Image (tube, rainbow, N blue to C red):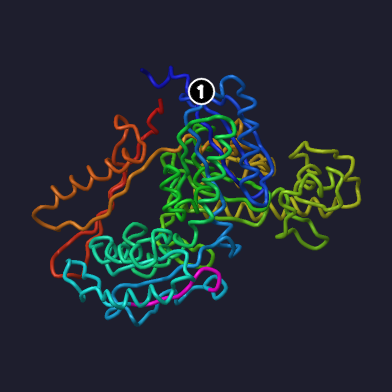
Amino acid sequence: MSRRTEPWLRIGIDVGGTNTDAVALDWDDRMIARAKRPTSDDVTAGMRAALAAVLAELGARAGDVRSVMVGTTHATNAVVGRRDLAKVGVLRIGASVTAAVPPLADWPGDLRRAAVAGTAQVDGGHLIDGYPVAPLDVEAVKRFLGGIAGRAEAVAVTGVFSPVHPEHELRVAELVRAELGPGISTSMGHQIGALGLLARENATVLNAALRPAVAAVTAALAQALDEHGLDVATYFTQNDGTLMDAAHADRFPLLTIGSGPSNSLRGAALLSGLTDAVVADVGGTTTDLGVLVDGFARESAAGSVIGGVRTNLPMPDVLSIAYGGGTVVYADRTGPESVDRAITAQALVFGGSTPTLTDAAVFAGRLALGDRARLGSGPGGRLKAAVEDFDHSLLEAVSLVSHGRRDQPVVAVGGAAGLIPATVDGHSVERPRHADVANAVGAAIALVSGEHETVVPAGSGRLDALAQARETAVAKAVAAGADPVGTAVVRIREVPLSYGGRRSIRVVVKAVGPLAAVR
């Protein structure tokens, strides 16, 4: 049956700092229903309210919903706010070759206090060619586990070159279950990041610490769907804009960190029909700028920093400026403070007493919100200056992310997209319909991905090893829920390795495909 004739619907939800957006799309990507609700302090209440509003608008067609995709800031908020984090026992394998830099050496002190139950290094691990550094010191592992018993809620284990040789990490996971019981989860470095030890270790520990925070969101979503009698497949969007099922999100919550900007960029691509553009997502607190390349977010070439911790996770290349609809306008400056989700109570045009950038945009004629008469003439000069401040910062940001190109249009999306002027230093500005819920649209249309990393020989056998890696990446995407018919390899990275006993190449293969229709 053709995808274009299916009656099935999918719901995309994006939880932003100010608002939670939800949309229902059919399998031909047509908008059927939409809602915008304030984001709640606990995140989940706002998500449930937006979902309920969309289902109410769908009415009898709510029974046609087959899948729900969610992008959430819950993991980001947990790390930045140092809250809702599990206490983690941190174990590194490879003490004899890594002791010069201890685990978590560059972590902020307050984050260590909030998330770490103890750290240790033990002998073990492998070189890149598989030669053992040392046998795994099982007794040292047991002593460490005994020392954190009753204090740690999770364990993070990272071994030298474990993405290629994970045997010692897998053995430690067995010991965790035996020594601490099945209630203590284990995050393993070979499942989290690439070969680099320190950034992969950081990511593995953050992943272990975030499991309770994201598990609360998956549980709340399941409860909300159950309340509405919906038996549907549930997915979360990842840093790269692709999907993982809820069970995968529970195991790898760190992968949800960059989902917001990725959703915004993908939604902007669909709504505008553009595949090569700058996207400016204007929210309540910040304006986030990214670049579309072939319809997808341009990936950052630098490692990502999350809550002050450097990781090696792939993230969209996003530049944020501290201007949004709720940015406070002072007598001598604009922001960076924001009234955030209280905009409808505190902004002047809504009867409040705090001048905001939304008031400035109404004063300048860019937005038609609230009661313009409430602005009077008193703060006019400062409101005009606030708009100029925003325009100047936006111009600089667009120039930076576009690398000086003038031929790329700017797609304005987000709840406060009206702040964007008609042109930005020669760049035309596109304002697609439904731009204010672009993030939720991006979540709804997200593809499913599978990624496989391995090391292959540089000479004889390379082509066969590459073919096997491609098959494995496609199989992982299909296993994650992709339609086998439309799934294909979209990226292969090959990096020659200059160390080890033989000439080798590190290979990372990524495959993506559309979500398989759920019957």
Q: What residue is rendered at 38% in x and 79% in y?
A: 101
x, y (%) of residue 254?
46, 56
Above or below 130: residue 295:
above
Q: Does the magenta stretch include residue 372?
A: no
- The 10 Å Cα crowd at callout 1, few under 14, some 14 to 19, many 20 or more, is some
Which of 25 and 204 lies nearest the eye of the viewer?
204
Predominant SS along the magenta part: strand
- Tell me the SS state at disc 1: helix
Q: Where is residue 245 in the image (x, y as percent from the top left)?
A: 42, 42
Taking 439 as reference, is 30 above or below it? Answer: above
Q: Which quadrant of the figure has residue 194? A: bottom left
> Does residue 493 show up?
no
Of 281 and 304, the residue lying toward us? 304
Judge from the rendering whether residue 411 lies leftward or rightward of residue 487; answer left or right. Answer: right
Q: Mark 1 points at which residue?
A: 64
- Residue at (54, 70) in percent of width and height: 111
**What residue is at 58 percent from the left and 51 percent from the top?**
288
Image coordinates of residue 272 in percent, x first then y, are 53, 33
Quadrant for the N terminus in the image: top left
Specify whether 69 is left or right of 474: right
Identify residue type, mark 1. Asp
Can residue 372 be seen in the rendering of this structure? yes
Q: Magenta segment, which residues?
A: 113-121
Which quadrant is the C terminus positioned in? top left
